[in-house]
Amino acid sequence: MNLLAFETATEACSVALYIDGEVRERFAIAPRRHAELALPWAEALLAEAGLQRRQLDAIALGRGPGAFTGVRLAVAIAQGIALGLDRPLLPVSTLAALAMQATGPRRLAAIDARMGEVYLGAFGWDGQGLQPLAPEQVAAPEAAILPEGEDWHGAGTGFAVAGGMLGARMGTRLRAADAAALPHAADVARLAAAAFARGEVLPPERVEPAYLRNDVALTLAQQQARRG
């Protein structure tokens, strides 16, 4: 199985190529350069592997949540390639991809959503795959609905928001958290490969970004109010 995966929902830009279990990736923290880098990286990975586009079985993408322009870019690129090749798409939660960088059976992924909020997702790991344990949410760290139970491991920039409020609220239930972790296309590809094996593919026109937040832009007064 051959998959091409894109993840551009945060300040990190990454593209990965999955070939029968082997994953190759290009990754960089490159704010505002995603559109410049994504397609050339994809072509470079295919060339390095000696693979033609028509040999791809599907296209995977991080569907968000994350930066609006970045999420839209991943969807647009993946849809364009999939339509041109007549291939299906495999949308993957960006929070789930981020959770792949945590350890243990209980994983909490958090992305800085700006404007004093975080995108938050709780996942269970059974040794073979991730399962969402609650609906993904966007909220201020002090108002987010936190998961129950002990021995959580966290990953993502959301753990640095508001002076580490999420970690403080979790207390000893959070064993560790990497507040510098960012989602990788390699993890999008791995999760997509498992979804492909389960037959969870979609036609390109049915894939939509996951924003979670309805108010794309706030006025200056609203931003100041949210910051208190």
Image (cartoon, rainbow, N blue to C red):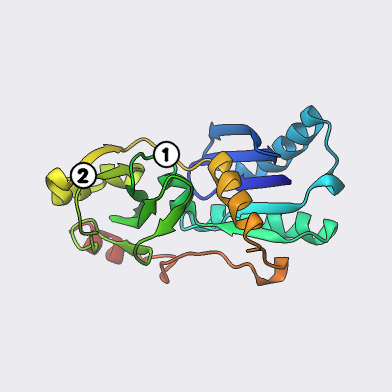
Q: Which of the 4 quarters of the picture holds residue 157? A: top left
Q: Quadrant of the C terminus?
A: bottom left
| 140, above or below 160, in the image | below
Residue 33 seen by the camera: no
Alpha-carbon span between mark 1 and mark 2: 15 Å
Nearest the camera: 113 or 15?
A: 15
Residue most toward the top? Answer: 48
Residue at image coords 83%, 61%: 86
> Mark number for residue 101?
1
Q: Is residue 60 left or right of residue 187?
A: right
Residue at image coords 19%, 50%: 150
Q: What secondary structure is marked by label 1? A: loop
Q: Amino acid at mark 2?
A: Leu
Q: Amino acid at mark 1?
A: Gln
> Mark number for residue 183?
none
Nearest the camera: 224 or 69?
A: 69
Instruction: Give how far across and how far down residue 48 sits, in percent.
Output: 78, 27
User: Badge 1: few (under 14), some or many (20 or more) residues near its Cα, within 10 Å?
Assistant: some
Q: Which of the 4 quarters of the picture holds residue 98? A: top left
Instruction: Give how far across and how far down residue 181 sits, in percent.
Output: 39, 37
Q: Is residue 25 left or right of residue 228?
A: right
Q: Which residue is mark 2?
A: 174
Q: Is residue 169 left or right of residue 133?
A: left
